[in-house]
Amino acid sequence: MCHAPPEPEKEAPPIRWSLTKRVALRFATLYSLLYFLPMPFSALLDAMKMEAASAFTSKVVQGIWLPIANFAARTAWHVQEPIVYRETGSGDRLFDYMVVFSSLVIAAIGTVVWSLIDRKRNHYRSTYEFLRVVLRYSLAIILMSYGFSKAMQFPPLQPSQLTTEFGQETPMGMLWNFMGSSLGYSLFSGVSKSRLVSLCCFAARRP
């Protein structure tokens, strides 16, 4: 009895991402690295009680971004007064806005260059997995630092704050007074943020 020879296995078609997906991945990778660095390394140095190394790293990065931020503010937004970096604990300074704007511009330019140099690449699966890890653990570090700081970040309200008129408050001052008026709520918000860290660090992988 004759048996038909087995059919050869068909090779899977090569994976090829769409042009939009490849360009979006390039931009997301460049912008994420510009936005988050050196935060994960600084946080690791702080956790290892290497405050001097962490401060030096942050100072170097600030020294790089400050002239870029001044150039962006002067040329794109017509801000003539130079930006002076001051540590205020806030992320809504003019310096921060210019860093975000400059990161977007640099990432866009880098995406164009990357797309021209690497235009024959079919996909970026390895880069995508790398980006997922960077975003997950960077977000986890941010949530952890904010969550743990909530227990001691907002002091109880003082008489001078209780007698301040509403119209004289700054947006940040109102937020701090609101959080400082309730220790229980501050602890609850801190624990809630800290619990999200487990979702970032131990997220289930797709099959």
Image (spheres, rainbow, N blue to C red):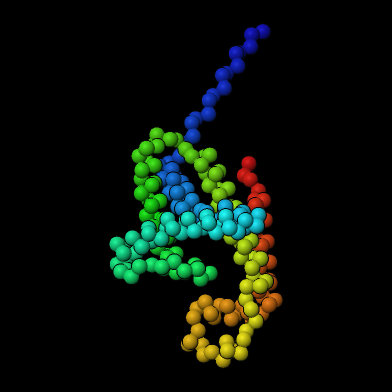
Residue at coordinates 62% horizontally, 76% vertically from top-left?
A: 154
Quadrant (top left/top right/bottom left/bottom right) for the C terminus: top right
Q: Pick the residue in front: 19 or 29.
A: 29
Q: Pick the residue in front: 46 or 30.
A: 46
Residue at coordinates 38% horizontally, 47% vertically from top-left?
A: 110
Q: Quadrant of residue 120?
A: top left
Percent position of residue 188, x then y: 68, 71
Residue at coordinates 67% horizontally, 75% vertically from top-left?
A: 185
Percent position of residue 34, x then y: 46, 53
Residue at coordinates 58% horizontally, 58% vertically from top-left?
A: 52
Percent position of residue 163, x then y: 56, 91
Is residue 50 among what the camera can see? Answer: yes
Image height of 50 relative to 173, above or below:
above
Query: Going by the image, does 134 lie left or right of 185?
Result: left
Query: Going by the image, does 180 lie left or right of 94?
Result: right
The image shows a total of numbered marks equal to: 0
Is residue 141 among what the camera can see? Answer: no
* Residue projecting furthest to the front: 52
Q: Quadrant of residue 155?
A: bottom right
Percent position of residue 138, x then y: 57, 54
Image height of 72 relative to 162, above or below:
above
Quadrant (top left/top right/bottom left/bottom right) for the N terminus: top right
Q: Quadrant of residue 85?
A: bottom left
